[in-house]
Image: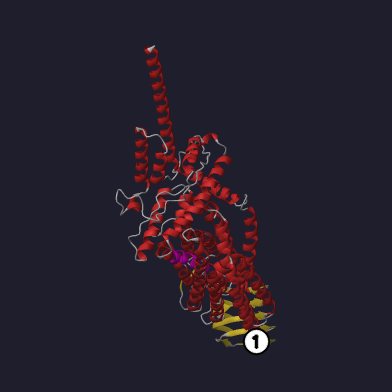
Amino acid sequence: MEDAYKDRTSLVKGAKDIAKEVKRQAVKKVNKAVDKAQDGYTQRSYNRFQDEEDDDDYYGQGGNYGVEANDDEGSSEATEGHDEDDEIYEGEYQGIPNMGQGKDDMVALGQSMHDEYKDRHELETERKADEEELAQQYELIIQECGHGRFQWALFFVLGMALMADGVEVFVVGFVLPSAETDMCIPNSGSGWLGNIVYLGMMVGAFFWGGLADKVGRRQSLLICMSVNGFFAFLSSFVQGYGFFLFCRLFSGFGIGGALPTVFSYFSEVLAREKRGEHLSWLCMFWMIGGIYASAMAWAIIPHYGWSFSMGSAYQFHSWRVFVIVCALPCVSSVVALTFMPESPRFLLEVGKHDEAWMILKQIHDTNMRARGQPEKVFTVTRIKTPKQIDELIEIESDTGTWYRRCFVRIRTELYGIWLTFMRCFNYPVKDNTIKLTAVWFTLSFGYYGLSVWFPDVIKHLQSDEYASRVKHFRNEEVSNFVFNFTLENQIHSNGEYINDRFIMMKFKSVTFEDSLFKNCVFEDITSLNTYFRNCTFVNTTFYNTDLEQYKFVDSELINCTFFHIRTGCQISFDDDYSAYWIYFVNFLGTLAVLPGNIVSALLMDRIGRLTMLGGSMVLSGISCFFLWFGTSESMMIGMLCLYNGLTISAWNSLDVITVELYPTDRR
């Protein structure tokens, strides 16, 4: 009887030992999953879980595991100043508390060890829940980091990039009149110079914006600004119109990434209550870029003496100097960006917890030192990171050569950018995408259209006034005469010029129609907007002139000789096209943006983004309508200034709304 009792006792004891061992192994697996998924348990919450279990030797080991994980992953300076027996400073941030989180998460983690058996929909659902939790926690962390020196430093660095974007928009309109003359661009081809930059900006915004969601805001911005600076600098030296268009296309492609990346980058280090105001202040740099471009054009382009030439094939005029100067803000932003960190919000989105934690600590410490509180420690130890979903990439078997590897890498990145773009048309952001596309299109159509069109309007109005003063000469008969003076704004019809010499002359806006030139000599001639229409030249010599074939329209040349003909269009050193006036007008139009910028910055967070956007667009549309009735320069200038001042509030509101309506991975 006693032996049976002992056997039964030993059996029970053995069963308990087996159950305890099974429980020990299960808890070990759970702890490993906790560490792998970075669930964010602090040591204090782990100890609460430990007290609810049996008091055996294993749970002491489990507690030691939690301490080691904390020491490895981020306690660092967060506990600086604590004694070992102290638990925590009062008010120290410990994440988003949830009393029932421990056991539920352990069960979930136990199941999530087999993610390969889940379909993509389940994984995306889990990731979405993680992103919502991260958004709440990140807002609290940014509030703890405060707003101070770091944000202001990033404000000026990103402001330089936005300033470069503003400069790029105005460069086209300012160089267009001079470039048309210097490169002999016909009127039918001049429109390409205005369009090509915006084509590049459109493609660039799509590409660099998608790349910023793949590789990071800072990295994408550095590359796109470098591309813009290189091709903008190169475009100032090229001579051919086709190559110049090519350079401006890629310059626009580079600067296209500035606007979407800058606002996404800056918004991710701002607390929600400060976002509208400070993004509006950031928009002022776009205005500063316009003022800078206007001032530089005013100071440089009319000085045609700031030029040199290498024969007749290479001409470097003042407008090319202006293009170089306009590339300086871009170069400055690239240099400054090398000293700034990546967006911590993006790093958390892609699962780089430690890097994001270090940057957030840098932001916190920088702001606290500036406030005179260097002793205040960064109390965050763990931050929620969304579940990372692996993307399967099909790679060809033959990828041994470097160019095939590059091709596969580029193709993969482009495909990823396309997928990111298509996700903007998925629920729940599909409606926002369609509505914002319409608003961006209409606002851009009005503002950028006027920016390119207005310099030509001023030039057209001045040309009409100039043409009204044209002098007509008909049925002239001149023989054995030496012309050695300037002819300007004249039309000569049905004339006969026999044995005449045209020496060291300048023809400026002169047209000869149905005239005869016999035994004449043209020597050292510089012409501008000068044409011979339906004229006849007999035994005439041309020496060192710029009278090329295209200036003889439907004309007949009989036994004529040409020596040392200067190719390319020549810019007259005496004619400034009233450039001072045009650039000053644009300077006023850009300066008119300042009041709208100030108003939008002060009222953005008070009256709301949508109210400001709608009101600004309605008022600016009304002011644009009155441009139809502009018949004088002063009226057009006044309407332009009014339109610019009203529309800038819509731009600022739209920038803020766009970054706030999209999640981080599609922003």
Q: Position of residue 157 (x, y in %)?
A: 43, 64
Q: Nearer the viewer, residue 58 or 445?
A: 58
Q: Position of residue 245 (x, y in %)?
A: 55, 63
Is any atom of residue 518 visible in this view?
no
Q: Is residue 562 magenta?
A: no
Above or below: residue 599 compared with residue 658: below
Q: Nearer the viewer, residue 613 or 561?
A: 613
Q: Residue at x 55, y 41 (%)?
A: 123
Is any atom of residue 479 visible in this view?
yes
Give the main secondary structure, helix, strand or loop, of the magenta stretch.
Answer: helix
Q: Residue at x 55, y 67 (%)?
A: 605
Quadrant location of the N terminus in the rendered image = top left
Q: Residue at x 60, y 52 (%)?
A: 424
Q: Mark 1: which amino acid?
A: Arg
The count of marks equals 1
Which residue is denoted by mark 1 in the rendering? 469
Q: Nearer the viewer, residue 148 or 500?
A: 148
Q: Nearer the viewer, residue 568 or 415?
A: 415
Q: Position of residue 541 (x, y in %)?
A: 57, 77
